[in-house]
Each structure stands twice: as structure tokens, then as C-alpha cells.
Image: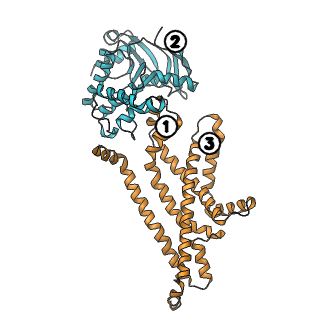
Amino acid sequence: MERIIQQIPRFFAPGHVSLLLDAASTTLALTIIGCVSGFLLAFLIVLLRQTPGLWALPLRLLGIAYVEIFRRIPFLVVTYLVLFFIQAFASNASLFTIAVVAICIYATAYTAEIIRGGFESVARQQVEAATVMNFSRWHTLTSIIIPQSWPVILPPAVAFAVGFIKDTALVSQVGVFELTFRGKELNNEGFSGILVFGTIALIYFAISYPLSRLGAWLEIRLASSRSQKPRERLRAA
Amino acid sequence: MHHLEVRNLASAYGPLKVLEDVSLTLAKGEVMALIGPSGSGKSTVLRVLMGLTRPVSGTVLIDGEAIDYGKPASIRAARDRMAIVFQQYNLFQNMDVMRNVTIAPVKIKGRVRAEVEKEAARLLEKVGLADKHRAYPEQLSGGQQQRVAIARALALKPEILLLDEVTSALDPELVNEVLDTVRALAAEGMTMLIVSHEMAFVREVASKVVMMDKGQVIEEGPPKQIFDAPRTERAREFVSKILRH
């Protein structure tokens, strides 16, 4: 305990603080870039899976295989796979890029299921009404399915991304300078593990908590948007 | 030549036959009613016509031209000439009334928005909803939603209007406002194929009644014949059941 107290002034020196803040922003950047690009790719995967016709069977199988496989591999293993694959083909790729790709691959598989569930929550009759009016698949998707399902999709997608902030710690294993990696470094420099990882834990919490509150707020707002927003709009009109 | 002709139509869900050898003819301006117990296949006839359920065999012709339900282009052409109103209205929940009525003519048919909106306003006035342009479906009663659905179908300028039990999901006090709308369309000479359980209404507006049971047509003729002097045993049975209450 005494050792910890002794170390505090040296540990919170400006150099270390900015190092940790940098690392925290790396963690946040990894999560945001990885999850947002994963979310967009997940849309493509879902569209592949829902393409009708015999000719599209390989596409559908590809979509299903992707989701089923990557949801069943530990994230750490995905990260190593990406590391070795990318290094085999582009040896000068940055570790940050490798981490983003790994996160993106993983987030794609998970959010694809969220998006598919959202699309399937749209009543079949809504789609039939569009079909008999000769809506194309694209028009049905953009005018009816997406507007009706995003209140169902967004909250769990945000919750996934927020939850993923802490899982990004695993990319420290391949040497990305994110929070956990810096923690290990400082710990190796002789700072108390309790002090270092206690601080790191607080930083993870400080990033995640507001974002998860944002997610919860979003959920409440979106859940009511279909019943209340039109009324507000009506009142305004 | 018949405006709409259905020849020996058959349809099935897997091994379950839902339509067997159904034939109908409809002249321009005629109102035909399909009646019969639930599960008799009436709604399936409309679904097949609109390309929502694939027929197993049989032919559908509009003005003598056959629709090929295996070809998307042919189905699209058929949907350009026919429109359907569903039992559950199926208005787009994420759009207000005006957008529900105008989206297909504007987005799908590529017509000028201002012109379509003017027509839509006229149609909404006709169905008694001139003050509801900006309302969302969930803010409307079932009867109002169904009238919007009729206006939405009419905005497509169909030659033939299909009505699939349009009052079955409504509270009793809301049935008449919808029937009045349909009555007005019949009076204007709209060609309609109506699936309905409202026998008094069918008797009043239909020029021809087709009674179905177990996927087959069991009798057809003018309402007088069907309701007052049915010729077949099964038709008599059904009529006596529905007229008892």
C-alpha cells in the first residue's frame, strides 16, 4: 500500500497521463471505426442473404457461412488470424489497421444478426403492400423496411459497440498501443499493478458508461418515436 | 371479349390444394362478389391475380392477354392494371396519409409529384379524409385507414380493383363508411372483384355472385339466384347458414 501511495505522483506525471489519454483515444477509435464499418458491411451481408433466386444461392450461403463462422470464433483468434494473414500479404500494414480489420470482421458477423432480426420484425403485409404496387426490392428496402426497422436495429447495435470497447483490450495481444497494452508497459516499468490496472479500469468505465447511457436513452427515444414523433409532427403542422 | 378472365385456376400450398379449377369472367364496369365460408379460397383467387401466390395451373387473361406468372415483367404489367385493397389495410406505418397515397405513382411510376398530390387530395376528399393528409396510420381508426387504402389503390388508376374482405377487420360501427366508399365506386362504373362477408352489401352492389367452397366454384349467378334460389345443395346450405343470422 505504501508503495502504491509513493508511486502515485510519479505515475500521474504529465508524460504518463498523456500516454494513457492517447491509448484511451486509440481504444475508442478502434471501436468506432471497427464497429461502424462492420455495421455497414453487415448490411451488405444481410442483403446477400436475402437475395432471392437460384442464381443467388452461393451468395446466400456465403452470407450465412460468414455469420455462422465468425460468431463462433473467439475474438482473440480472429485477431491473430488477421495479423498473420495481413502480414503474409502486406508486411508493412500497421498494427492499428490490423486491429481495425479484426474488429470490423467480428462486428460484421454480430451486427448482421441484429440487422436481420430488425428486417424480419417488419410485418410481411407491409412488404406485400409494396410488392403489389410494383415496388422493386431496393425501393421496398429503402422506403419501408429500413425506416420501419432502424428503431429495432440501432439500440442493440449501439449496445454491441459499447460492449466491444472493453473487448478491444484483446488487441493489445498483437501489440496495438491501446489502453491495456500501455497498462502492461507501465506495469513492467515497475509501477504497481493495482495502481496501473485500477486506473485503466477507471478509464474503460469512464468511456463506456456515458456511451451505454447514450444507448439506453436512444432505445427509449426510438421505441417511442413511432408512436410519438408523428403526433409531435402533427401538432407542429 | 371479357375484361378479366380466369380459366381453370389451381393453386396449392405444398400438398394442400387451395384452388381447384376456378373459372371466372368479369366484364368492364361489372362488380363481382366472391362469397363462401372462410378457407374456401376466395382471398387466394385475389392473391394469385396479384402475383402474391403462384398458381399451379390455369390462365388469367386481361382483355384477352394472358399473364405469365412465371415472368416478373408479365406480373408487373398485370399489377399496373389491377390494384388490391387488403383486409388489414396494410398502410405503410412509417408514412403519413398523403405519402401512402402518392409514393407508388411518384416513385414507382415516375409521375410528377405536384400532379399526383393534386389527384391524391381529390381522392382523399372523395373518401372523406380531406383533413387527414398529415396523419399517420396509427392515428386513424380502422375505417379511416381502410378508406386511405382505397384511395391509395385508386391513385394507381387501376382498371380492375380487387377488394379482399375490406370490412372484416373493422368494428361494426365503422363498416358502413367503407361500404359507402365502395358503393360510390360501383356507381361510377369501376370494375371490381370483391371478396366479402357482408351479404346485404353484396346483394346490393354485385351484378354477379360467385360462391366458393373448398377451393372450387360451386355456383355463380346474379345475387337474386344465389341468395333466393340457389341451385346446388352446398350453396343452399351456405346461404341458409349465413341468412340465419
Q: Chain of mark 3?
A: A
Q: Is residue A148 above or below residue A88?
A: above
Q: Which residue is mark 1?
A: A140
Residue A190 appears anywhere in the view: yes
The residue nearer to you, when weighing B239 against A91, is: A91
Residue B238: x, y in percent? 35, 18
Q: CA distance from mark 3 to mark 1?
A: 19 Å
Do the residues indicated by labels 3 and 1 lie within the same chain of the protein? yes
Which picture quadrant has residue B127? Answer: top left
Q: Secondary structure at mark 2?
A: loop
Residue B234 in picture, x, y percent from top left:
39, 15
Judging depth in this view, the residue of A105 and B230 nearest the camera is A105
Q: Which residue is mark 3?
A: A60
Could you tell me which residue is drawn at 34 percent across and 38 percent down? B137
CB of mark 1 within 8 Å of CB of mark 2?
A: no
Q: Chain of mark 1?
A: A
Residue identifier under label 2:
B64
Q: Colour of chain A?
A: orange
Q: Amino acid at mark 3?
A: Arg
Taking depth in this image into account, of B230 and A56 the one nearest to the observer is A56
Q: Report crowding for label 3: few under 14, some 14 to 19, many 20 or more residues within 10 A (C-alpha).
A: many
SS of the residue under disc 3: helix
- Using the numbered discs, state the Cα–Cα distance from disc 1 to disc 2 in whole angstroms: 31 Å
Q: Amino acid at mark 2?
A: Gly
Colour for chain B in the figure: cyan
| The quarter of the displayed image where residue B164 is located | top left
Looking at the image, residue A207 lies above or below residue B43? below
In this rendering, position of residue A160 left or right of residue A61:
left
Tell me, yes or no, whether the two marked residues, 3 and 1, touch with CB atoms within 8 Å. Answer: no
Identify the residue at the far left of this view: B173
Tell me the kind of residue under disc 1: Thr
